[in-house]
Image (cartoon, rainbow, N blue to C red):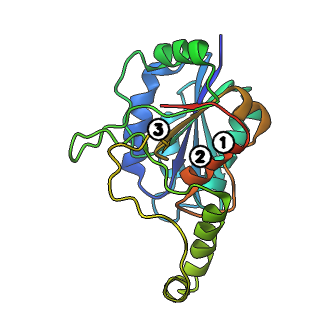
Amino acid sequence: MSKVVFVILHYETTEDTKRCMDSLFKYLSDTVELVIVDNGSQKGRLVDIAAQYDRCEHVYFIYSEINLGFAKGNNIGFQYAKKELCADIIILANNDLIFKQDDFIEILRENISETCFDVAGPKIISLSDGLNQNPVPRIYSSLKDVKRRILLQILSVFSLDTVLKNRISLGIPRIDDWNHITDFQLHGACMIFANRFVAEHDGLCDMTFMYGEESILRFQVEEENLKMIY
C-alpha cells in the first residue's frame, strides 16, 4: 500500500497548528504519517507544544533555527518524508487547514490509482465565505514571466520593486475575466505530490521566499511533462 506523509509548515501560530494536527490524527497509521516543521519560530515555538504529542505514533517534529521561507521550509519536511519515511505520496499543507473528510486518504489512493497524477490539489473551502479556493487561473504563462516575478520579490526586500514597476513594463498579461480560464494552477495551501515528482524532486523550487511557488510549479509541470490535476 502506498505510503502517505503529510508535511505541515509551522510558524508562530501554535493554535492553528494544533487544530490542523488534531484534524489529521484520524488518518494516521503505519502507512500514513505526519511531519511538522517549525520554520524558525521565535515566540510560538513548536517545541512548546511538541510535548503534548510525545505519545502519538507516526508524528515527527523537525526544527529550523531560522525562517527559511515557504519553499525551503517545506522542502525540509519533503526530504524527510521522502528519504527517511519512504513516502510515495507527500502532501504539503498550510498549518491553518482543517481536514474534515473522513475518507480523504481512501479517495486519494483511488484517485492516484486511476489517474497516475504527479501533482494534485484538493478542494479547499474558505471558512470566511464558504467558497472553494482551488484551482486558480494560471498567472504566468512563460519562464520569462516567472523570472520577473522572482526578480520583483528579491527587489522587494530592498523596497526597489516599485521603482522597477514604474520604469519598465513587466509584460505580464492582465486577466479581467477568470471564469472561463482552463489553464489553471493549484492553490498553494495544499499540494499533493506523487509518482514522477516525488521520484525526481526533493521539493519545491527554492528560489523564492514567499509567494509565487504555485506559478513556478505550474510552469515546471508543463516543462517536464508531468500530470497535474485538481
Q: Give residue 218's mark.
A: 2
Which residue has dot 3 on it? 52
The mark nearer the N terminus, 3 or 1, is 3
Crowd rating for badge 2 (residues with CA inside 10 Å; few <14, some 14–19, many 20+): many
State if disc 1 and disc 2 touch (CB < 8 Å).
Answer: yes
Inspect this view and state whether residue 66 appears.
no
Q: CA distance from mark 2 to mark 1?
A: 7 Å
Can you give x and y, in whole percent of width and height, for residue 180 in the image?
A: 36, 42
The residue located at (75%, 40%) in the rendering is: 201
- Would residue 129 appear left or right of 79 to someone viewing this image? left
> Which type of secondary structure does the marked residue at label 1 adopt?
helix
Residue 209 position (above or below residue 101)? below
Q: CA distance from mark 3 to mark 1?
A: 43 Å
Determine which quarter of the picture holds residue 225.
top right
Residue type at tag 3 = Gln
Residue 136 position (above or below residue 105)? below
> In this orientation, which residue lies closer to the viewer: 180 or 67?
180
